[in-house]
Amino acid sequence: MKVAAVIQARIGSTRLPYKMMLTLHDMPIIDWVMRRVCRSKRIDEVIVAIPSGKNDDVLFKHISKLNLKVKIFRGNQNNVLNRFYEATKNKDITHIVRVCADNPLIDWQEIDNLIDFYKNNNCDYAYNHIPKNNLYADGFGAEIISFDLLENLNHTVILDKHKEHLTSYIWDNLDKFSIKTFDPIDKELHHPELKFDIDTFEDYYKLAMKDFDIFDTSKTLINIFKDKK
């Protein structure tokens, strides 16, 4: 089993343009994501998949100058499904963990827990990045599928809406796939009401106003952000 974490990132954003380069405690959001993902013990390769358009040249140049063990792939801006496929084909990669670059506080331990869960459960797709049918906070986890499934989707999906989002076809066809999720192992992490991903300026401001470190665990972060009653 060879697992690649593919970080989906772009400069353009309807709700919060240029957010990848916004800083959290003097470090761009994309740096937080890459550095935290690189701590995973189950990931064999980290790839940042960004669009090939000129708007994302600044993102490419920034990542290229960092001394991190990540590879950069540039592909189709709108067909994210194909971008993931092209980024991972011909590499002997068997499984892909999709990481959204909107999640600066993604937890490498929860990535490892996701991979272990997937290996021990017979399913097509597993996730722990959103609090849907689980007790995870929003923004600590990721999604995992096999390369074989990714390849199949890339060759068969027709609708643009399913090409724009890696797993939307799976979610729209639940009868065709086995989907599984799970709760955090530590019950202190059971906080589905908390949101750590950045979609809007309000989300960014909420995180920027708190004091935390680049390698704080999800337990530490929850203790910082949860409602102290």
Image (tube, grey):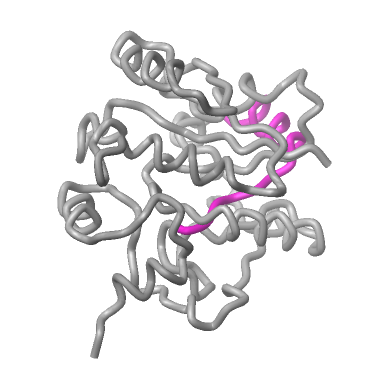
Q: Nearer the viewer, residue 83 or 70?
A: 70
Q: Position of residue 145 (x, y in %)?
A: 68, 45
Q: Quadrant of residue 102?
A: top left
Compared to residue 142, the image places residue 134 above or below, namely below
Compared to residue 11, the image places residue 99 above or below, namely below
Q: Residue at x 58, y 22 (%)?
A: 71
Q: Which residues are magenta?
A: 140-158
**40 sits left or right of 78 in the view:** right
Q: Residue at x 67, y 53 (%)?
A: 125
Q: Nearer the viewer, residue 225 or 86?
A: 225
Q: Quadrant of residue 17?
A: top left
Q: Residue at x 77, y 18 (%)?
A: 90
Magenta highlight on residue 77: no
Q: Position of residue 73 (x, y in %)?
A: 54, 18
**33 sits left or right of 144 in the view:** left
Q: Position of residue 113 (x, y in %)?
A: 66, 61
Q: Nearer the viewer, residue 198 or 31?
A: 31
Magenta highlight on residue 154: yes
Q: Quadrant of the N terminus?
A: top right
Give the number of callouts: 0
Q: Quadrant of the C terminus?
A: bottom left
Q: Position of residue 221 (x, y in %)?
A: 38, 66
Q: Residue at x 43, y 12 (%)?
A: 52
